[in-house]
Amino acid sequence: MGEQSSGKFAWIGDEDSPFPGSADIENCNRENCSVILISGNKDPDRVLEIVRNRCGSEIPWLVYGSDENMEGWLNAGAAGFLPVGTSRETIQAALHGISKLFGNARNRNPLSGLPGNIAIASRLKSDVLEKHGLAAYFDISGFKPFNDYYGFSRGDAVLRSLAAILTENLSEYFVGHVGGDDFVAIGEGIDFEESVKRATRIFNGRAGGFYSGKDNAAGGIEALDRSGEFRFYPVMDITVSIVDGAECSSVEQLARRAGLEKKRLKGELLPDTVASFLSGGDGIPEYQDFREWLRNSEPDTLQIKALIESAGILGDTKMTTCLIEILKKEKDHKIRKSAARALGNVAGQDSAEALKTALKDGNVHVRTAATMALPFVLGAEAGAFLKDAVNDRSTWVRRAALRGLGISGWQGATGILRCELEKKGDEGYWLNRSQELAAALEGAAFLGDPLLADAVANILRENTGVPKETVWKTLLTLGSQVCVDEMLKAVESGEYFDIIRQLDSFDPCGLTFESVEKLESDLTGLNLRRGTDRIEILKFLGRVPGGASGDILKWLLDNIEKTDDPHEFEALLETMISREVAPRGYDLARIVDRTAKNRLKLTRKGIVSMLRWASTGKYSLSKIYLEKLLRHDSREIRNAAARTVVSLARKQTEPQKK
């Protein structure tokens, strides 16, 4: 029984179990129970409550009882009915059959009906890792943008089509569905590889049929990417990676090899690592491997540094032990410095002790690199060590420590950074002082503690040698009422350009209504010549929480009439939406009229924004204009127009329902 079932067969009944080896329901759960047989003499409602509480609704159950109760039990959800007197052998065979049937169903992908990850992993292990089989990994290039563009229903149709093609053309081999657009086939020999190629050709030939006529003719779709910009995505096709199990000890390693092969086929740079280069495979290199490379290749110092720092850039965790030994043993300080930098980028806690020791290295460059690395490795725990580094004899180390304190988020960082921000200008060499002050400002911005805002604000009034743009960036990042007061003073005095350039760093949330209202009023009252500056103001207004009212409401609506720059108009529409400003009856008509007369040219993104804004109100766009947009070449515009039609239609019927 254990060989045929994934769990126990349980019996629920007051009488003796009709089959041997049955388990007590009290000892079963959804992990170890495969099928339950219930006595027909029990009360259905009470028994089913016990089953669901212990095993959940996914465990199948059958009933052993008299024929007159059969219909009632089957209606209650029984997977089968066994009449009293059924032989033990027949009962056990029925339980095994139900267990296997439900087990197969649970292990199949519900969309494609193909075996899922459990079956795939088992076959990969038995046929590829332990024998000489091949695994073909299928991936649909361009599926995600297609799915986003046309919707999940059509995306599911693509996956079902691929599943059918693979099943038909690889009928003699195992085919599984990992999930999403990832499929796997397992087989061996030339015939298997030819079958894979045939299935690929068939899908690639059919792929264009899933697109609209215009998109298919254009060779793909133009859709908004995650940054909100339009991008062209070619018609989908399949990339297939065929790999064997040589030198792979796990299913995960096999999948990684397939991923590398896929990148190679697509012409992408393989994600090679320094560890694989030095170890000659997937091993973890030791210090002697590094020294052997030096002896054999005789690289110059720049090449050595480049290789070491590449390990950090690639996040090569397998290099950690080797990098630690390089930091400890290499005589050339330039190489030790690169090792410290790389350990900071890898950010593994295993390197903490080595970096702490390097804080006392005799070379300033090594100490600086270790100081920069420590907050990434230890987080807040690095604060106590960075506190001492602030008093290092080298300005380079001191600067790295001040920045690192902010990155670490250590509780004591606020006090130390405040002392640095409030130091008088005559303390130490002037150039060092200004650069260390700039580092302290960076540290304060990283830390984000509003309690430092007053110390930063005081620097604005002093000739510290630090560009005011840098000071403003820190102050705006910190926020608080102190920041707002300084912003208002700067706007009133006409010294507001540094503020506008850094305005995206300022978060207006959490400020008093009066403060934000005054700031909005002053910023919108500026006579700005550059459109980029006006766009930054609009983006700021869009981040202010709550709806717009009073003067700001009027200012926004007035600008709908005046603004003719397409990018500025786009930003204005987005601000209207975020501040809950609905269009008036004539706003939409005038926009359409201006575009028709070429007095306003909207980008595609601008048209989408305009339609979104229109859907927030109760007034419709002209039917002719909407019909034009519903047939636009851009699907984003067609979708936005369709949503606007539905939204406005819904709002027009709401008064009638009342």
Image (tube, grey):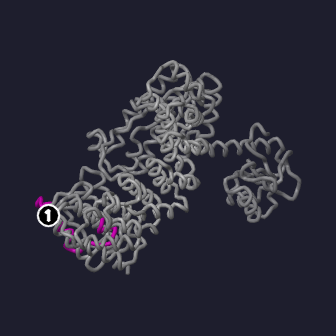
Whether the magenta-drawn stretch holds residue 597 is answered as yes
- In depth, the one of 240 and 421 nearer the eye is 421
Q: Residues within 10 Å of mark 1 (few under 14, many from 20)?
A: some
- In depth, the one of 340 and 377 nearer the eye is 340
- Residue 144 quadrant: top left
Residue plotted at (76% across, 54% down): 63
Whether the magenta-drawn stretch holds residue 649 is answered as no
Q: In the image, what residue type sits under mark 1?
A: Arg
**Is residue 163 visible from the viewing direction of this image?**
no
Q: In the visual, does 541 lie left or right of 446? A: left
The location of residue 505, given as percent across then percent down, is: 36, 61
Q: In the visual, does 288 lie left or right of 158? A: right
Q: What segment is highlighted magenta in the picture?
A: 574-599
Residue plotted at (48% across, 31% down): 272
- In depth, the one of 624 and 356 nearer the eye is 356
Farthest-out residue, left: 597
The location of residue 553, given as percent across then percent down, is: 27, 76
The location of residue 614, given as percent across then percent down, is: 27, 67
For the N terminus, the image quarter is top right
Q: Which residue is under mark 1?
A: 594
Residue plotted at (33% across, 50% down): 224
Q: In the visual, does 396 lie left or right of 219? A: right
Image height of 129 relative to 455, above or below: above
For the C terminus, the image quarter is bottom left
The location of residue 391, given as percent across then percent down, is: 51, 53
**Is residue 154 visible from the viewing direction of this image?**
yes
- In depth, the one of 424 and 125 nearer the eye is 424
Q: In the visual, does 467 lie left or right of 83? A: left
Tally the numbered discs.
1
Badge 1 element: helix
